[in-house]
Image (cartoon, rainbow, N blue to C red):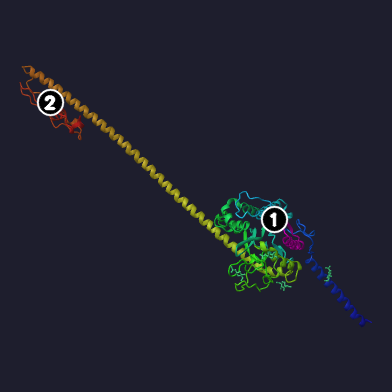
């Protein structure tokens, strides 16, 4: 019957809808949970990539020396599970690959810490040789003592969005805690800047050996120095490379299992085996360490990507084992498929704010640069002006000196000439006197005067220089007949008596 068939049809339609809904839900759940945990005995992972998809994001880790241990292998398996969900290739180094060129590490620690920048650099360089479409775009460094707590969170969640131009130069994302920057987990763009940065980290023991000897950490201290120290070569540029790196919240990918690493009395909490109370439940309830229970920004919360057991080296097993048990259980509160979606808005806000800050920083440093450039030009101009004036002054002085010397020379020549002239006059005078005398003598010896009138001796006084001491005499001698003329010549007399004052005239 028509009216009796109706409920059956409705039931059929409902059944089909249910199957479709259940199948689809099942299918997407299967996709999200495509992360079959291999478990079993440890075998070193060599680039764990899911076959179906390969992400353009990769991971890098060094698990050499004491980090090549069971608990670390378990931690790496949490990564493998994460990698399988998202298609991440994970490069893991199990052997040291560098030596120290100089013995400068007072603790003679193994070189795994320096294998880290070398290994990262080698992968970056290799990727940069590939065609663009085959290349990894970003790599995430993870210390070996990190465990993934939420396998569903994709790493691209944290990367700078491509639509914000101000942050397109960002090559490094790194978090910081009470110790400053923490190099336990960081993201690096596959770029030439990142290669150069890693090479600077690797070379740190060579160019800052004194600092290294004092540093508590190794590669971390190097990163801190290069990025933040006033003496770092990066600090010499106005922008200080600040458009290349961003400090991000710890909880994004480097959360810690403790709210405070120190008790109120200063004791290092992380240096002892973990107690039951210290096994954080990932909520706002925190272990009573005497600090008053204020929640810190680096403590892991449920749904966060990863936990980092930084500094727990001697008691690592105790801290890591319960956390690894929890990670492997994949509990919904921790392995939360929507946590990253819930975070996306705040992450976006972070990048928008960073974009604005960088634009402001760029303007500021450009202004500084312009100002510096202007000051430099101004200084150069002043210096040039001064140099020109100095040159002019020197030239004037040289000219004056020359003129003075010339004048001196002329004066000297004139004096010389004058002297010669005077000598000549004196000579002439003496000659005249001598002649006169001879004539007079002749007259005196001859009884018969030869002249009817006396002879007059005239000295032309104009021949004497004004400044010279002309003889004061104008020897006009009247000579009477039969009388010998008497001539008195004071100058000549003075000269013959050795007059010193008149020396100039002779
Ligand atoms: C669908 O869900 C059921 C029950 O949860 C499960 O047993 C089954 O394996 C799932 N199917 C797929 C394809 O994941
Ligand atoms: C500091 O406090 C912790 C916890 O109360 C305690 O275990 C530790 O012994 C104290 N250390 C010192 C040096 O007093
Ligand atoms: C930590 O616990 C382990 C056993 O779980 C023990 O062998 C070790 O001595 C403990 N270390 C400290 C510092 O208490
Ligand atoms: C997963 O995360 C979202 C967003 O933070 C939250 O609302 C939800 O309750 C979480 N689910 C579980 C099972 O904890």
Q: Residue 26 or 165: which is nearer the viewer?
A: 26
* Residue annotated with mark 2: 457
Q: Nearer the viewer, residue 397 or 136?
A: 136
Per the image, is 104 magenta?
A: no
Is 406 displayed left or right of 168 in the figure? left
Where's ligand 1: which quadrant? Answer: bottom right
Q: Residue furthest right?
A: 1
Disc on res. 301: none
Residue 375 falls left or right of residue 430: right
Local packing at callout 1 (Cα closer than 10 Å; few below 14, some 14-19, many 20+) is: few
At a point 62% along the width and 51% down the height, the residue shown is 203
258 above or below 370?
A: below
Name which quarter of the figure residue 297 lies in. Answer: bottom right
Is any part of residue 223 visible from this angle? yes
> With respect to residue 358, does 497 lie above or below?
above
Q: Write the start and end of the magenta stretch as one range.
A: 66-91
Task: Please indicate whether residue 168 sits to the left or right of residue 447 in the image.
Answer: right
N-terminal of the pair, mark 1 or mark 2, is 1
Which is more toward the observer, 318 or 415?
318
Q: Are marks 1 and 2 in contact (CB under 8 Å)?
A: no
């Amino acid at each position: 019957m028509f009216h009796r068939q109706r409920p059956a049809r409705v039931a059929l339609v409902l059944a089909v809808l249910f199957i479709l809904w259940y199948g689809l839900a099942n299918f997407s759940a299967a996709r999200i949970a495509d992360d079959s945990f291999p478990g079993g005995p440890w075998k070193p992972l060599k680039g764990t990539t899911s076959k179906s998809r390969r992400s353009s994001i990769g991971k890098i880790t060094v698990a050499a020396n004491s980090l090549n241990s069971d608990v670390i292998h378990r931690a790496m398996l949490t990564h493998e599970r994460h990698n399988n969900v998202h298609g991440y290739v994970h490069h893991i180094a199990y052997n040291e690959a560098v030596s120290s060129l100089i013995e400068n590490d007072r603790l003679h620690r193994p070189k795994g810490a320096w294998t880290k920048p070398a290994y990262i650099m080698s992968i970056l360089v290799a990727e940069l040789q590939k065609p663009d479409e085959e290349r990894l775009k970003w790599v995430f460094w993870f210390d070996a003592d990190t465990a993934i707590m939420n396998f569903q969170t994709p790493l691209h969640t944290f990367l700078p969005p491509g639509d914000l131009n101000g942050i397109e130069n960002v090559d490094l994302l790194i978090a910081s805690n009470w110790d400053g920057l923490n190099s336990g987990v960081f993201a690096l763009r596959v770029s030439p800047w990142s290669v150069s940065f890693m090479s600077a980290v690797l070379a740190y023991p060579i160019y800052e050996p004194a600092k290294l000897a004092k540093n508590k950490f190794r590669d971390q201290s190097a990163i801190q120095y290069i990025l933040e120290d006033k003496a770092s070569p990066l600090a010499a540029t106005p922008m200080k490379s600040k458009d290349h790196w961003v400090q991000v919240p710890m909880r994004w990918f480097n959360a810690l299992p403790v709210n405070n690493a120190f008790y109120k009395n200063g004791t290092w909490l992380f240096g002892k085996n973990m107690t039951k109370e210290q096994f954080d439940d990932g909520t706002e309830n925190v272990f009573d360490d005497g600090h008053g229970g204020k929640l810190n920004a680096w403590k892991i919360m449920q749904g966060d990507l990863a936990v980092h057991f930084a500094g727990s080296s001697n008691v690592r097993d105790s801290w890591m084992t319960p956390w690894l048990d929890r990670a492997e259980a994949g509990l919904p509160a921790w392995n939360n498929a929507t946590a990253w979606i819930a975070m996306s808005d705040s992450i976006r806000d972070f990048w928008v704010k960073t974009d604005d800050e960088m634009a402001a920083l760029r303007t500021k440093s450009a202004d500084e640069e312009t100002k510096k450039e202007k000051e430099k030009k101004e200084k150069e101009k002043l210096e040039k002006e001064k140099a020109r004036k100095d040159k002019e002054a020197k030239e004037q002085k040289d000219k004056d000196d020359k003129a003075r010397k010339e004048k001196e020379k002329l004066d000297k020549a004139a004096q010389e000439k004058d002297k010669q002239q005077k000598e000549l006059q004196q000579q002439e005078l003496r000659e005249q006197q001598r002649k006169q005398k001879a004539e007079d003598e002749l007259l005196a010896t001859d009884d018969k005067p030869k002249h009817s009138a006396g002879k007059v001796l005239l000295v032309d006084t104009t021949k004497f220089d004004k400044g010279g001491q002309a003889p004061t005499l104008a020897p006009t001698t009247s000579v009477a007949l039969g009388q010998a003329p008497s001539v008195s010549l004071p100058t000549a007399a003075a000269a013959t008596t050795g007059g010193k004052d008149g020396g100039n005239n002779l």
